[in-house]
Image (cartoon, grey):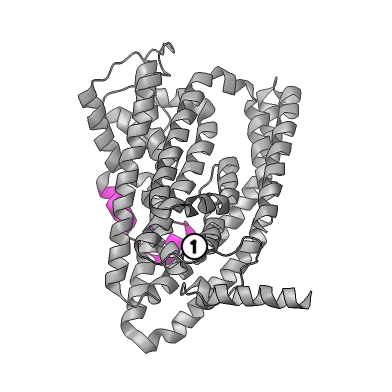
Amino acid sequence: MANKLTIQIGIGMVLGLVLGVILNMSFGGTPETAKTVGGYFHLLADVFLHLIKMIIAPLVFATLVAGIAHMHDSATLGRIGGRAIAWFILAAFISLSIGMLYANLLRPGDGVGLIAQGRDAGVDTSALNLRDFVLHVFPTSMVDAMAQNNVLQIVVFSLFVGVALTAIGDVGKPIVTLIESLVELMLQVTSYVMRFAPFAVFGAICAVITERGLGVLLDFGKLLGSFYLALFTLWAVLAAAGFLFLGKRMFHLLKHVRSPLLIAFSTASSEAVYPKLLEQLDRFGVPRRISSFVLPLGYSFNLDGSMMYSGFAVLFIAQAYGIDLSIGTQITILLVLMVTSKGIAAVPRASLVVVAATLAQFNLPVEGVAFILAVDHFMDMGRTMTNVIGNAIATSVVTKWEGMLEVEEPEEIERPHAPSHTVAGGKAGLELAEDMVDDQRSRS
């Protein structure tokens, strides 16, 4: 099933690229027409993203509450959360350091020759401050949090509900059973939605190439080349860290998450990947009670690609305006980004907002953000893909630390929707799958 979806997504990307080039050659001379035509193709991606947003809130809530209810121990919850946060902080430091290191080594901004005009960058940074971020973490209404698909607020509410269900014991069992059923229901809905993914990928790629064309990649070649080289380095470091803890299973993890990675790259949306990533981690052997807790936290605090981009972009803009920054200033920028980047998930146009706010704080030309907008979508594709692999590795490593990483399911076997495996994280679901395969073989 996963192989088939991966192939279909790959075909969608290729067809979208080819048709996008043809349409850009036809309508590229009139940007407004190209934008209109591209908008119609992007409708496929927009429909898919709407469907994903439809299932995100109930899926996060149900899986997280059910997972916590089956932990039976608040100390375990605290230990898992502590290990996850420790990994997130270390990953943030590494991501920012790699981005800033490559910006210094390759210096992609040299020679651009921008001149500060004091213009507005068009990015609202007012939402990015410590007070508002802390308040933003805690929901005033669960209904509003779910309506806004605010993952961080849903996580906070789910933590309270899950711990409370554990505390009231047998009285809460009917609610736990209901939530387990909701998990299975949402997983089934997810399987329906994911069948539309190849069409969404086709539409997204076709739209962006129709509107911007491949020529923009050449115009900003040095910037994009330097950025993706830094991303590949970050990938290598994350993979090495994963291999250190997971051993050869790290290669199996990459194989399991290839479909989510392709979706993330083509749609530039982390939300679009969440349901499929949760399912693939389940197949890899991560118990649902861990993945449903660590993964939403990672979506809020462990955006490795976005953090690397933030450090890289700040230094690129400084170089483009001919501003030299001392090592001390760059270290200060890194420490500031270590804090401000944790609010990325809480504001719209997240990475650009963080970059703009950091530029303003260090009296650098904020208007430089507008210069990279032309290729920001292409960089967003890479950083979103990196966010996904970073969270997949983080969740798997935390599971390994807990000694709870299970035997992975054979990829060609369709996972049965059994609460004993998907929610409690036990091996009963895997045993059931093996029995089903044996039964099918005996019949044939």
Tell me if I can see residue 118 in this picture.
no
Specify whether 280 is left or right of 302. right
* Residue 234 pos. (x, y %): 42, 37
Q: Quadrant of the N terminus?
A: bottom right
Residue at image location 64% in from the left, 63% down from the top: 191
At 37% from the left and 58% from the top, the residue drawn is 398
- 78 to 213, vertically: above or below: below
What range of the chain is rendered magenta?
Answer: 131-152
Horizontal side of 186 relative to 209 (left or right) equals left
Residue in the foreground of this view, choosing between 425 and 368: 425
User: Residue 46: x percent and y percent?
Assistant: 62, 47
State the SS at label 1.
helix
Which residue is identified by label 1? 57
Residue 140 is situated, as x and y percent measured from the top left of the image, at: 35, 63
As for residue 9 lying within the magenta part, the answer is no
Q: Residues within 10 Å of mark 1 (few under 14, many from 20)?
A: many
| Nearest the eye: 257 or 51 | 257
Q: In the rendered view, would you say 358 is above or below 298?
A: above
Kindly report the secondary structure that dominates the magenta region of the rendered protein. Answer: helix
The spot of residue 127 in percent (x, y) is 34, 43
Q: Nearest the camera: 291 or 322? A: 291
Which amino acid type is shown beneath numbered disc 1?
Ala
Residue occupying the far bottom of the picture: 170
Inspect the magenta stretch and tell me whether residue 148 lies in it: yes
Residue at 43%, 67% in the rendered image: 64
- The residue lying toward the viewer, choosing from 373 and 159, is 159
